[in-house]
Amino acid sequence: MSADMIQLLSKALGETVYMVVVSMAIATIIGVPLGVLLHTTSKGQILESPALNKVIGAVVNAIRSIPFIILMVAIIPLTRLIVGTAIGTTAAMVPLVLAAIPFIGRLIETSLKEVPYGLVEAAQSMGATPFQIIWHVLLPESMPSIVSQLTTVIITLVGESAMAGAIGGGGLGDLAIRYGYQRFRPDVMIATVIILIILVQLVQFLGNRLAKSLDKK
C-alpha cells in the first residue's frame, strides 16, 4: 500500500474518531437525562407521571424505529439548517446524535431499573429530594451498567459513522466506498475493515475496564 493511501487511511480514521467522540458527547449530555426522566416518571417511581412517560416513550420509540440510513436522508434539510451543509463529517454528526439520543435514553432507563428500590426508599425515609436520589443513589449505583451501555452505543456509532460515508459523511466508510468499492481496491476495503475492527475492540476493552473499576460489588 502506498504512502499516499496510508495518509488517506490516517485522515479517514481521524475523521471517524472525531465524528464518534463529538456525537457521543452531545448525545450523552441529552440522552442520560432523557433516560433518567423515562425511569423516574414511570409507574411507582419518584416522579411518577404516566402521561408524560407515555409521550416521551412514544417519541423515543418512533425515532429508534427509523433505520439509520433512512434517518440520514430524511433529515438532510435539518442538517443543512444546523451546520449549513449535508456533506462532510460535521454534517454526519447531526443524524448520528439524533439516532444515539433515544438509544442512550432507553439503555440508561434499563440500567436505572437495576438499582434496588429499597435504596430509593431508604433515601426517601431520610428526607432526600428526588434530585438528591437521582444524583446520589440512582446514578452512582447504576454507573458500572451505564458505562457498559454507553460502550455499546459508542460501538454502534462507529458502525453508523462508517455507514454515513454512503452519503459523503467522510471517515473510513467514505474512504472504503470511494477507493475500495468504486475504484476496485480490495486492499483499501480490507484495511478499513481491519481498522474498524481494531477500533471497536479497543473501545470495548476500555469500556469493560472502566465498568469493572466502577463496580463496588
Image: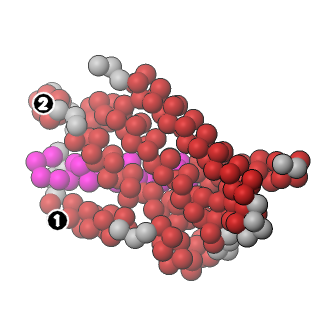
- The span shown in magenta is 23-45
Tell me how far mark 2 sits from mark 1, CA to CA: 25 Å
Image disc number at residue 140: none
Q: Indicate the secondary structure of the residue bearing disc 2.
A: helix
Predominant secondary structure, magenta span: helix
Q: Position of residue 136 (x, y in %)?
A: 30, 31
* Residue drawn at point x = 69 percent, y = 60 percent: 176
In contact (CB < 8 Å): disc 2 and disc 1? no
User: Which image quadrant is residue 79 in?
Assistant: bottom right
Q: Residue furthest right?
A: 3
Q: Residues within 10 Å of mark 1 (few under 14, many from 20)?
A: few
Which residue does the numbered mark 1 point to in the structure image?
A: 51
Query: Is residue 170 in sight in this rendering?
Result: no
Q: Is residue 165 left or right of residue 56?
A: right
Q: Position of residue 213 (x, y in %)?
A: 43, 22
Q: Position of residue 61 (x, y in %)?
A: 30, 65
Q: Nearer the viewer, residue 87 or 167?
A: 167
